[in-house]
């Protein structure tokens, strides 16, 4: 190569480097044949490339560096390891870090050894393997502190990693000590990401959430590139907190956001954690479908298997254990729990191990294995004491209180209920009794009898009275301990908590019919005479009165099979000689949710929001209202009212979809309308427009003909002028004209 060219190339490269144009400078050095200088610049400025998210550019330059130069500058091996780690290729990352460690050891470079060990530590921190990280961290710190003039920034960085690793091990108090060491060397030290996780793993959920939300706010105000943070992605942390606080919709949205970060940053580990957090949210959604949660957990497991990160399977396995435990499938729950525990115990993660053990206790509780449940929850309680997790402690006290109440251990109940309420109040964990949470009971109404009993025993009476008032139960002296779920659209189903009533549970057909009547007329109390007129129109007064008593008793027994003698029924209330459904009982009725969503969707002026509301509501309409009572006079008006609401909602949704040019979806809803009411003329007009827009003029004409026929047959009339005019326009126009 011409010497003059080389000289000018060096000068130009030096200028580019001085002005911060490192990439172009390295290119010039390489073009001039000076691989050593290019490698030196890469060693100095590689960290900048990484921190600005230029991972591919960094990797490309490292690959083009000759092996001899790479071995002479061990930071290039560390950079390559970092890129592999950010891409979740952990074995290759460890290989690079190990190569750097060996090169540093051969050169007696203690600082280089410490940096290479730090890289290995970060792999095990990313995959939450505190047992493997601990010894490496200790060696890295020893090497740094025995090197000549160690930098405080490097020391603080390693101390922060030690604190994080201790958090992962469930040793929160020791972690706090290491954070304090960081502050000793760097007075303004703060690592919000790590401290948020410390708050989470010590049960300070509100503080963790507040800190995490601050991080999100700060990140949104900067344009800096984002590097993958493995399980630490703040959206994923917030998603877990939301599930622990019983906010499934929020948890779902945050899990989705975390998954998208993983996809955008090419970090499959992050995406996999998003899937498992999505599974937690799916378990808590109001319309619970266990298959959705199972699919999420399976997706997370499969991704972890592809990454060859066995430890990553622990949390989805725990999720499956919780799911099957609440379903009463003890063997399955125990199997998944043992598999999860094998992963966390292998790496000394005591914190997650304790929550996994809770899943076994829950499975034992729901299968009436009282002694095993008691032993598990007591063991978990002691383990959370060692971890310093106040939330975990509160959860175990909750289950111990439920167990003591269920097995009628009065003294034990008083003791653990008192401690539970104290922890609940001091930790601000009210969500545990107000909403379904990740580690709480499936049905929070299960806790109502415990609070009522606590009030009777004057346990933390002021706080209990406050809780019962918030729950609308301040005057209640009895609660059956479950939510009454009623489904009326497309069929009639009743569940007591998680148990569905079968036909034999009603004992008498008239008991079921009485309940259906009270559901239809729930906004009023029905006099006994009115009930008899509806249900026994042909019977004499004496026979009807006798049958009413038997029917009412059968109904109360079906809804509250374990109600104690001489205790007033909870779900069916009586005032004098009038009866009705107790509106304060917290029952869930599908038509209430259906009506609320449809009305909101019809009124919302934002098309996108309206479509979401309408689709959610229309999904609930699985068929006509109480189809087994379609011929009863007392049911007809409500059935027709709900049907008209469905048709109006479907029509507005179809209109919005036409405006959004989602013609196929609009066709779906219009066809659903004409199946229910073949004289709903607006649906025909929308069908004609959609098919015409899709280029199918013949199908548009057919729908006009169907409209003509239906109106003539049913009402003896022609289509309205607007429909006729539309047909005329379609017949004479090109698709682009409309």
Image (cartoon, rainbow, N blue to C red):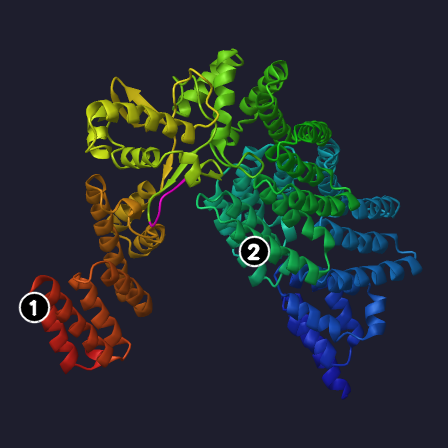
Front in this rendered view, residue 483 or 151:
483
Residue sitting at x 77%, y 74%:
65
Judged by its main secondary structure, the magenta piece is: loop
Residue 386's tag is none
Q: Nearer the viewer, mark 2 or mark 1?
A: 1
Q: Position of residue 614 (x, y in %)?
A: 31, 53
Q: Quadrant of the N terminus?
A: bottom right
Q: Is residue 153 visible?
A: no
Question: Which residue in the structure is indicated by mark 1?
Answer: 718
Q: Is residue 703 left or right of residue 500?
A: left
**Looking at the picture, does residue 604 appear above or below residue 394?**
below
Front in this rendered view, residue 213 or 337:
337
Q: Residue 201: which quarter of the image?
A: top right
Is 100 inside the magenta-drawn segment?
Answer: no
Q: Position of residue 112 (x, y in %)?
A: 84, 56
Residue sitting at x 65%, y 69%:
56
Which secondary structure lies at badge 1?
Answer: loop
* Label whose residue precedes the other's in the sequence (2 or 1): 2
The boundaries of the magenta stretch are: 490-494
Q: CA distance from mark 2 to mark 1?
A: 52 Å
Q: Position of residue 181 (x, y in %)?
A: 75, 35
Q: Quadrant of the C terminus?
A: bottom left
Question: Which residue in the structure is indicated by mark 2?
Answer: 295
């Amino acid at each position: 190569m011409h010497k003059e060219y080389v000289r000018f190339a060096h000068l130009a490269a030096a200028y580019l480097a001085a002005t911060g144009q490192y990439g172009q400078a390295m290119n010039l050095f390489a073009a001039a044949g000076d691989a050593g200088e290019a490698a030196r610049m890469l060693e100095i400025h590689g960290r900048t490339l990484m921190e600005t998210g230029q991972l591919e550019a960094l990797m490309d330059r490292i690959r083009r560096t000759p092996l001899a130069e790479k071995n002479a500058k061990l930071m290039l091996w560390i950079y390559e390891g970092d890129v592999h780690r950010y891409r979740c290729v952990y074995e290759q990352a460890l290989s690079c870090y190990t190569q750097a460690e060996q090169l540093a050891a051969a050169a007696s470079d203690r600082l280089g050894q410490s940096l290479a060990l730090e890289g290995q530590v970060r792999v095990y921190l990313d995959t939450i393997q505190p047992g493997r990280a601990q010894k490496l961290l200790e060696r890295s710190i020893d090497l740094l502190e025995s090197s000549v003039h160690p930098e405080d920034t490097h020391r603080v960085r390693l101390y922060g990693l030690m604190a994080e690793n201790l958090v992962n091990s469930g040793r929160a108090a020791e972690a706090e000590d290491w954070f304090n060491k960081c502050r000793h060397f760097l007075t303004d030290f703060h690592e919000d990401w790590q401290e948020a996780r410390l708050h989470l793993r010590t049960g300070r959920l509100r503080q963790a959430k507040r800190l995490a939300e601050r991080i999100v706010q700060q990140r949104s105000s900067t344009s800096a590139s984002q590097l993958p943070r493995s399980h630490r992605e703040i959206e994923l942390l917030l998603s877990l907190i939301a599930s622990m606080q019983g906010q499934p919709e929020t948890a779902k949205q945050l899990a989705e956001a975390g998954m998208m970060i993983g996809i955008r940053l090419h970090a499959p580990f992050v995406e996999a954690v998003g899937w498992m957090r999505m599974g937690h949210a799916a378990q808590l959604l109001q319309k619970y479908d266990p298959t959705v949660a199972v699919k999420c957990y399976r997706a997370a497991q499969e991704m972890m298997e592809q990454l060859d990160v066995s430890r990553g399977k622990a949390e989805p396995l725990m999720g499956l254990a919780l799911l099957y435990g609440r379903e009463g499938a003890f063997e399955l729950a125990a199997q998944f729990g043992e598999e999860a525990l094998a992963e966390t115990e292998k790496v000394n993660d005591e914190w997650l191990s304790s929550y996994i053990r809770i899943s076994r206790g829950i499975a034992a509780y729901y299968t009436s294995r009282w002694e095993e449940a008691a032993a598990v929850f007591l063991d978990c309680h002691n383990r959370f004491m060692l971890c310093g997790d106040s939330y975990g402690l509160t959860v175990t006290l909750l289950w111990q209180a439920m167990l003591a109440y269920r097995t009628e251990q009065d003294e034990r109940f008083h003791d653990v209920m008192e401690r539970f309420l104290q922890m609940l109040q001091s930790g601000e964990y009210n969500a545990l009794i107000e909403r379904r949470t990740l580690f709480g009971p499936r049905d929070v109404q299960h806790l109502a009898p415990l609070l009522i009993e606590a009030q009777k025993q004057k346990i933390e009476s002021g706080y209990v009275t406050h809780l019962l008032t918030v729950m609308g139960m301040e005057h209640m002296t009895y609660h059956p301990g479950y939510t009454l779920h009623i489904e009326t659209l497309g069929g009639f189903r009743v569940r007591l908590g998680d148990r569905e009533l079968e036909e034999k549970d009603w004992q008498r057909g008239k008991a079921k019919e009485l309940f259906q009547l009270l559901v239809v007329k729930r906004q009023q109390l029905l006099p006994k005479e009115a009930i008899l007129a509806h249900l026994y129109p042909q019977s004499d007064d004496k026979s009807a009165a006798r049958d009413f008593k038997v029917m009412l008793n059968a109904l109360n027994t079906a809804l509250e099979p374990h109600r104690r003698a001489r205790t007033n029924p909870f779900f069916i209330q009586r005032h004098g000689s009038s009866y009705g459904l107790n509106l304060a009982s917290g029952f869930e009725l599908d038509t209430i949710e259906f009506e609320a969503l449809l009305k909101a969707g019809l009124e919302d002026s934002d098309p996108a929001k309206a479509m979401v509301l309408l689709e959610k509501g229309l999904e609930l309409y699985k068929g006509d209202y109480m189809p087994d009572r379609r011929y009863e006079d007392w049911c007809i008006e409500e059935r027709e009212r709900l049907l008209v609401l469905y048709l109006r909602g479907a029509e507005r949704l179809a209109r919005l979809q036409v405006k959004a040019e989602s013609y196929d979806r609009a066709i779906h809803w219009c066809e659903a309308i004409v199946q229910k009411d073949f004289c709903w003329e607006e649906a025909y007009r929308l069908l004609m427009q959609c098919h015409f827009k899709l280029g199918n003029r013949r199908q548009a004409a057919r729908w006009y003909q169907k409209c003509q026929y239906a109106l003539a047959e049913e009402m003896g009339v022609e289509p309205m002028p607007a429909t006729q005019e539309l047909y005329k326009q379609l017949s004479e126009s090109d698709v682009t004209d409309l």
